[in-house]
Amino acid sequence: MLGSAARGRNGASSTTIPSLLCAAAAFIPMALGHEHHEDNIPEGETVSADPIDSILWAHIFVQMLAFGVLFPLGMVLGIIKNRWHVPLQVLSTVIALLGFALGHMHGGRQFIENNVHAKFGNTVFFLMIGQVVLGAYLKLHLEKGIHGRIRPVIRMLHSINGKAFPLVSWTQMLFGGITALGFCQGDHLGQCLAHFIMGSAFIAYAILLTLLLLVGQLWLRRTGRSQEFFDSVVIAAWGCVNTFTEHRWGTAWVKNDWQHTTMGVVWWCAGLAGVWLSRGRDGQPQRNFIPGFVILVTGWAMSAHPQELMISAMTHRMFGYTLMAAGLTRIIEICFVLQDKSGVSEDGRATHSFQYIPVFLLYASGFLFMGATEEQMALVSRVGIDGVAYILIMYSLAFLLFLFVNMLIYVYDRSANAPTGAKPNAMNGRARGTEDARLRDAGEFELEGLMSDDEDEESAARRKLLKEDDEPGLASPSTVGRNSDRVA
């Protein structure tokens, strides 16, 4: 019976996935045959002045649901080998295909044909279909002959593609926002790249810190390295890149070139120092303040950037203060909360509430920096949103992503790191005692009409003694004596 049930489930899955592939194949000719109208786009622009219609809004929200929520959740379910992984990924793919179709059916605002969102969207589409094909092959459980040799390779490709898909989805959603507003063109491209890459890097760093805080402490101990070693290596590498890319060498130094370049120099210098300090005298992993101090100094430098618009200056200043707070709280966490220890507890499961503060501030820093480009600031100023409201919106987005990441980690942790040999819940014992007392009271209530007045008094005394017996502690000799007298 179990075998037939398993075959039934596999058969249903084998039927569903090819049907999904056929549906995907039906969407491809429609997408390739779609004509992009550009007659309303002014010369030199990338979008028309038409408003975004309801179909395009539906495309935006449907794709955010599929790529921003369901696919990452399905990835986590796949890592823990949950039975809902395949159904959820099938549903996500169907929703994504619907959104793909809506993106080619909209009216209203027009876009140039070779925009970055459309180009990268085709790549995302084929990666998604490739992931479905790889998953369908693995679901068939073909392990004989040549399949036994290629199955491990297919499994590895499926795993890598699935884990990289949230990063691909994040990139595509950023491209979608940029394309919808016609930003990051011409002279604004370099500044856009700096803000979105650096802001995304802060958010990625925050996600990694969240992972290490909640489920990565034991992994860190197995590596034999402190967390500051890895942080300092990344800081040093990023500083080297910034040193040679923030200024076009051979041209005049303009605007903030000096600040950006010297910031890169500070990063790789401090990163090297952090790597050195990550080892103690005996060679054991050692915590240090360097990464937190680098974040603090970077926030101070960013808060002093000159800006043309008042709202831009306010946003950059708040970004700098937030980043400074993240660095300062990180130093306090290491030096005073943890006192140079790797974690709060030996088993790596306990956390201190203070440890969440620098992590969240890094989320907020990333959103503030991504939302502070010149074109975004000009748009917000034209709309009439004041700086305080805009900053609160960025903080709200940071809270939502912070919540979602913690929820995904919780789903993984509940399955992968479930505590073994847990102590029985004390409530169970109390509940059972309460249930026994309730049964005794019910029995006495049913016999109440058959008892005399003397028996009622005796029953009341018996209930009183039984309640005393239910309380924790040893029975006293006087209680035993009274029970014996009553029996006599």
Image (cartoon, rainbow, N blue to C red):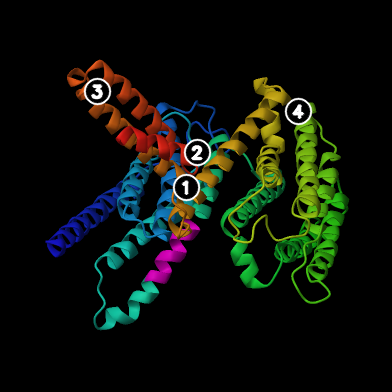
Mark 1 or 2, nearer chain start: 2
Judging by the rendered image, the residue that carries numbered circle 1 is: 118
Return the x and y of residue 481 as percentages of the image width and height. 41, 38
Whichever of callouts 1 and 3 sits on the residue coming sooner in the sequence is 1
Looking at the picture, how far across and down is residue 423, in whole percent? 47, 54
Q: Cβ–Cβ below 8 Å for labels 1 and 2?
A: yes
- Predominant secondary structure, magenta span: helix
If you read the primary sequence from the N terminus, does the residue marked by circle 3 or circle 4 appear first? 4
Residue at the image position 80 percent from the left and 61 percent from the top:
288
Real-space Cα separation, disc 2 to disc 3, in angstroms: 79 Å
The residue lying at 24 percent from left, 23 percent from top is 445
Pick the front one: 373 or 70: 70
Question: Which quadrant of the figure has residue 106?
Answer: top left
Disc 4 is placed on an element classified as helix
Distance Cα–Cα, label 1 vs label 3: 76 Å
Residue at the image point whose x is 80% and y is 64% from the top: 271
Which residues, given as a range, are shown in magenta? 155-165
Disc 1 residue type (three-letter): Ala
Q: Nearer the viewer, mark 1 or mark 3?
A: 3
In magenta stretch: residue 159: yes
Q: Which residue is mark 2?
A: 111
In this figure, which residue is indicated by the disc labeled 4?
311
In the image, which is nearer the foreground, mark 1 or mark 2?
A: 1
Q: Residues under labels 3 and 4: Cα distance?
A: 74 Å
Looking at the rendered structure, the kind of residue marked 2 is Phe
Q: Nearer the viewer, mark 3 or mark 4?
A: 3
Which quadrant holds residue 126? bottom left
The image quadrant where one finds the N terminus is bottom left
Q: Tag 3's secondary structure?
A: helix
- Can residue 106 be seen at all in this image of the molecule? no
Q: Between marks 1 and 4, how big is the CA–CA gap?
A: 32 Å
Q: Earlier in the sequence, mark 2 or mark 4?
A: 2
